[in-house]
Image (cartoon, grey):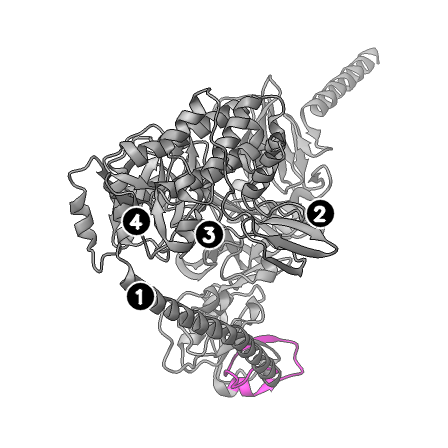
Amino acid sequence: MISFKRNKQIVWIYLWLWWNTTANICVKATSDSLKPGDTLNSKSKLCSEQGKFCLYFDSEEAHLVVSSGVDGAVVWMYDRNQPIAIDSAVLSLDYSGVLKIEFQNRNVPIIIYYSPQPTNDTVATMLDTGNFVLQQLHPNGTKSILWQSFDSPVDTLLPTMKLGVNRKTGHNWSLVSRLAHSLPTPGELSLEWEPKEGELNIRKSGKVHWKSGKLKSNGMFENIPAKVQRIYQYIIVSNKDEDSFAFEVKDGKFIRWFISPKGRLISDAGSTSNADMCYGYKSDEGCQVANADMCYGYNSDGGCQKWEEIPNCREPGEVFRKMVGRPNKDNATTDEPANGYDDCKMRCWRNCNCYGFEELYSNFTGCIYYSWNSTQDVDLDKKNNFYALVKPTKSPPNSHVNAGKRRIWIGAAIATALLILCPLILFLAKKKQKYALQGKKSKRKEGKMKDLAESYDIKDLENDFKGHDIKVFNFTSILEATMDFSSENKLGQGGYGPVYKGILATGQEVAVKRLSKTSGQGIVEFRNELALICELQHTNLVQLLGCCIHEEERILIYEYMPNKSLDFYLFDCTRKKLLDWKKRLNIIEGISQGLLYLHKYSRLKIIHRDLKASNILLDENLNPKISDFGMARMFTQQESIVNTNRIVGTYGYMSPEYAMEGICSTKSDVYSFGVLLLEIICGRKNNSFHDVDRPLNLIGHAWELWNDGEYLQLLDPSLCDTFVPDEVQRCIHVGLLCVQQYANDRPTMSDVISMLTNKYKLTTLPRRPAFYIRREIYDGETTSKGPDTDTYSTTAISTSCEVEGKYK
């Protein structure tokens, strides 16, 4: 009895040890992960953290599947070609890192993943993305993927799941349809990513039936309806590791794509494409598409690809349409070895005696083909589906409505075009007439100009300067230097065209003057400027580096002045503060030295004729350089005065004898220098004085302050205490001497430099300046009196201002 009790106790101890060991080794998964030793059987599920997807053994599919937690749809299964015995199936992750499926009546397990080096630091997790992933845990807390279900897509594409090819392993990611809805066996239709063309393709038995078209600039494929694509963000990767396509949903909702046994790529947001309707030929009438399911096929519209000619017995626009009823089977034929709907459809399409079909078996395999008589004799009481060949309709539904809308759109388009074109035509006609008149007028003027050659060839110009130290640039190098004359490189607008900054191939910065084709400067002015500047060498004159002649293009290349022109600083309230009195005095002296060189020390006497602040460039040290010699005139040293019928220059800077009589001399430049000198002192333009109690120009304003002994009031307020009063007085004195009414009263540039640089007292007093009229105000009237006359003229007060412009 004691022995029996002892044996009973030993048995209980063994049972307890066995249960305890089994419990430790075969632990059921209770979370979203399988750890080493955990199992998943047919009675349990492994669901993601938020329950969006679950992994389990499906008895209907007879496979290990992943389904959506939203609608229960199967989105993935393992090895569709190998069904398993669900009741005894167990998924396990052992301590060696092997993920496998075991079940009764099978000695060898199905290995999902086998680690080359056994490890127990693994975990298999069902993610909320729908990806079932096996990962290895590393000591530093990181994880690496050993295997994942996303690498083996079935017929469903989930967000972030890839199509394409893994360049490292050579593995292809693609969707393959089922043979039939109830048969998970792989069918003949597949969805693939074609990286070379950047397109999605639907293939049947390797032959392309449909293409998405390329991705357009708006982020949408050409042949997928735009309303379907608005919710997607496509992810396309192309590098040494992979060429892949994936999508994400912009609003974060769960949407999947799956390819059906009929060749349709379906999404929860609507049908994405319809390869089912592509019969391999092009329709002359095109394809009327309301959505992808309404594609009438037989053409290359909507992404359908042509792979064979249309049978002679078929008409473009014919389709097989799903019908309800059971046709008369008296003349029906059957075909058992068929792989479902698509095979049945294509065999019937190629058979001229076939006008309808349906699947033979309940699993949607095999075919029944119907003759024309059978499709006309249908028992509508029977709840059965078949597909009948339907002739194309001559006019689509609501064609009268569509036609009306089309007429409205066409009418609106024509009206809009007329509203745009009529004013445009009138504008162009007036513009053409204006240019024609200007052309005639210009030709008449050109005939009268003594300094304009009647004919001058551009090649002659190149020959003229071969012996000079001027580099001739080719037009291509100028385009490269100025980035095709880009607006970002534009420095300013000169009298005869824009000026651009350029960087030569050597790295040298240059200023490129591009003569405008519509400007007054022609080939003669261009030759004139070249002839002048190539002979000039002075520190206060801008240096010409070269030129370029290309067809009608005439370009001058100068040294680059980083500080732009004097007016850029002088007439700006903020930048003028950079010009203290010392710098301004240096600029005045530099300009005078440059003019003296032109008038006296150059090989030919040169009158600039357009001296003003915008034509004074400043180098990196703010030293002045006179530029823009397009209007200059040459004299021999014996000549002093010349008459010209062509008056050029800028209002406010031209001497009275030149502006009114065309008499040009060095004293004309002296007058311009005097105006510029007063502008430098004052910091304002000559025509910027509009007070009713003062003259309307700077010269008259300075003259009155000088006579009142208040000349320091002319000084720019921004100079503060940086100026020397005696130097300011001397400069104003010299400036007023330069702008006197009569040319003979004005000093030469030699005299100007002597007066500016020497400290002796100036004894010559300035006389009345040019263009000065004294004004007094009497009870709302303006009374003007000339200084040398007793004649008065009275007019009502009006606001006026001088306009700076060019004489043409």
Label 2, secondary structure: give it: loop
Say left or right for 647 vs 775: left
Label 1, secondary structure: give it: helix
The quadrant in which the N terminus is found is: top right
Real-space Cα separation, disc 2 to disc 1, in angstroms: 86 Å
Residue marked by disc 3: 192
Which range of residues does the magenta coloring cover? 374-398
Question: Of 795 and 170, which appears nearest the observer?
Answer: 795
Real-space Cα separation, disc 4 to disc 3, in angstroms: 85 Å
Q: Nearer the viewer, mark 4 or mark 3?
A: 4
From the top left corner, tell me how far across and down residue 432 is, in percent: 40, 70
Real-space Cα separation, disc 4 to disc 1, in angstroms: 24 Å
* Residue 739 in sight here: yes
For residue 700, above or below residue 620: below
Real-space Cα separation, disc 2 to disc 4, in angstroms: 99 Å
Q: How crowded is mark 4: few (under 14 residues within 10 Å), some or many (20 or more)?
A: few
